[in-house]
Image: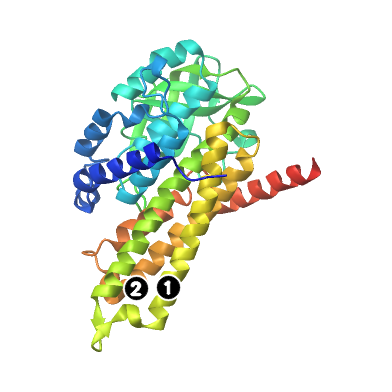
Amino acid sequence: MNFDFSEDQKFLANEARKFLGAQCTTAHVREVLNDESKSHHDGVWKQVVEMGWLGTAIPEEYGGLGLGMLELCVIAEEMGRALAPVPFASTVYFFSEALKTAGSEEQKKQLLPQVVSGDIVGCYAASEGPGNPDVSKLKTVFDGSKVSGTKIPVTDGDVATHAIVLAKEGSGASLVLVDLNGPGVTRKPVSTLEPTRSHAEIVFNGAPGERIGAAGDGEAHNDALMNRVAVLIAFEQLGGADRCLEMATAYAKERYAFGRPIGGNQAIKHKLAEMYVKNQVARSNCYYGAWALSTDAAELPEAAAASRLAASEAYWFASKENIQTHGGMGFTWEVDCHLFYRRAKLLAVQAGAPKIWKEKLVSALERKNAA
């Protein structure tokens, strides 16, 4: 059995890498990092929209390319490798997938074509502070027509045009679509370790909302969405981890100390070897997750948790050891190592921190063994 991507999917990945290598360099990333007025790189975003990537996994009847989740996974890996400073994940992984899995046919026909065209930039507002969103503790409420409450932090919440909000409704929770340019919405930027992916606090004060899915199904929809998002974010982490290994290896070959490349030192060899092993473990788990995601397999909760944990560990380790391999240079502002370290720390907590995914993996395995 071959778990590798097809030749067409590898071609897509190669073309995406060439495009991002030319149009989304670390210089573009630094433009956003160094300019507090920028929430993302508008030029890169417009080109991503023109490439049609927002519609990669959106069916053709809604204006998308209709390629599938495997193709989205390979693009996600390249986006992570390039540190793309754009609201791609918020719009495609969270917003679009929530609509695809929970939205009505009318909502899909109305909203998904606008996602593909770039007219809608989406975000997902579940968090109300530290910790995993708990339906029993939600303070944001939906009364059937309006939303009130505060969500923080919301990734890309300052640039998004629409949000899907996890809100308490009755004794349960629901997903609610809110136009962020409408009445009753106040937003302000929130500072984080990683300014190239902006975050915001969004306050809803009787903002008009439209339910996504049935009333009270929000918790189930949120759990299902997180499994799908986890695999896609894991591929972004995998792309970043591989790039860190490449950077460290290249520097170890070109940096000379005492008349020979530092890559000849056993300590450096061990760093690079361990980075490689962790990356390969992460890739194996990500491929498992991609299979489960693309086939809607019953193993998706287990595969999502495994890919998320392995990729988080690999990216954090690779970004850290990349800095260490670069030595004194690695800690400077001029070297790009810190860009990857920042992104690794951010992605590790998006859609749930590793502790949460460890608990999910244990629960999934317990259910599997009890069956």
Asked whether disc 1 touches disc 2, contact meaning CB atoms under 8 Å apart, the reply is yes
* Residue type at the position of mark 2: Thr
State the residue lying farthest toward the bottom: 258
Q: Mark 1: few, some, or many residues within 10 Å (few <14, many ≥20)?
A: many
- Residue 104, x across and y down, in percent: 51, 14
Residue 365 higher or lower than 247, as above or below: above
- The answer to whether residue 269 shows anywhere in this view is yes
Q: Secondary structure at mark 2?
A: helix
- Residue 149, x across and y down, in percent: 49, 29
How many marks do you count on the picture? 2
Q: Is residue 264 left or right of residue 143?
A: left
- The answer to whether residue 353 shows anywhere in this view is no
* 240 vs 71, nearest the viewer: 71
Instruction: For the N terminus, give its image quadrant.
Output: top right
Residue 325 numbered mark, or none = 2
The part of the image, by quadrant, that contains residue 134 is: top right
Q: CA distance from mark 1 to mark 2?
A: 8 Å
Instruction: For the C terminus, give its image quadrant.
Output: top right
User: Going 19% across and 46% down the picture, which residue do you hit?
Assistant: 22
Q: Secondary structure at mark 1?
A: helix
Residue 270 higher or lower than 73, as above or below: below
Tag 1 residue: 271
State the residue lying farthest toward the right: 370
Q: Is residue 14 left or right of residue 302?
A: left
User: Going 49% across and 27% down the picture, which residue do you hit?
Assistant: 98
